[in-house]
Image: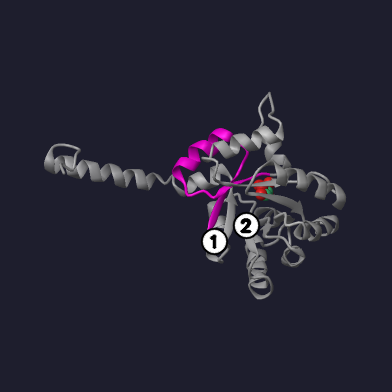
Amino acid sequence: MEIYLDTSDISAVERLYRILPLAGVTTNPSIVAKGQGKNPLPLKSLLRALRNAMDNQARLFVQVLANNAQDMITEAQILHEYTDNLVVKIPVTAEGLVAIKQLKQMNIPTLGTAVYGAGQGLLAALSGADYIAPYVNRVDAQGGNGIQMVAELQKLLTEHAPHVKILAASFKTPRQALECMMLGCKSITLPVDIIEQFIADPAVDAAVTQFEHDWQNAFGNKSLNI
Ligand code: G3P
């Protein structure tokens, strides 16, 4: 499966790309705005920096800002021409579906985003989106059941659009992410703090320290002597 970082923080991407099996980075307008300091980079420069932080190999997901189909398509064309291996994120509104259908004809890969329901996600898939991003925590925060929505969407895609991948998004806990992965989602995007929690268990550090202690007690040094 593909794991993405949901961030525009260049130094976090650089640090975590070295450690984790990341397929790339996902952004949206809020994430781009939040990741910028006092001197915000133009979008094109930011995307270049994110790509550089990942050995120029990884996939980028970048969202349009327009809310009518024609302007979404224009923005998508510009983003598509920026760089290879970029997927354009389109909110799954009525206008977004128009854009997704036309972008499919133009061979511009898309992700249907801001998905709050399985039926909404299926329509984006049938319209030609390559990825669908259900918003797990935002559904939970509304009093719904984000994981159940993902399960329903995964079932619908398996039945009716098996080539389309869920890219599960919007997480506040590692458990939410784990449950999506167990449902068979082919891709997921995680905020920096959530992905770090998968590898930051104090019990792991304690176990490693104990290995060193036991070895040193027996052999008097910290080397395997091989
Ligand atoms: O990728 C979409 C996602 O970033 C939304 O997350 O945390 O704003 O609900 P959040």
Residue 213 marker: none
> Label 2 neighbourhood size at 10 Å, few (<14), some (14-19), many (20+)?
many
Write down the residue under mark 1.
181
Along the viewing direction, whichever of 30 and 187 lies nearer the viewer: 187
Closer to the camera in the image, 102 or 174: 102
User: In front: 140, or 33?
Assistant: 33
> Where is residue 58 drawn, in percent x and y?
56, 46
- Does residue 113 appear to the left or right of 208 in the view shown? right
Boundaries of the magenta span: 1-27
Of all residues, the one furthest to the left in this rendering is 219
Up the image or down, 124 lies above or below 217; here it is: below
Residue 140, placed above or below residue 15: below
Disc 2, SS: strand
Q: Position of residue 139 (x, y in %)?
A: 70, 57
**Image location (x, y in percent) of residue 221:** 16, 37
- How is the model colour-coded? one colour
Instruction: Look at 65% across and 65% down and name the residue there.
Output: 164
Q: Is residue 121 magenta?
A: no
Residue 8 lies left or right of residue 214; in this view the side is right
Indicate the amino acid at tag 2: Ala
Q: Earlier in the sequence, mark 2 or mark 1?
A: 2
Whether pointer 2 and pointer 1 mark residues with C-beta atoms closer than 8 Å, the reply is yes
Q: Which mark is residue 168?
A: 2
Does residue 70 appear to the left or right of 159 in the view shown? right
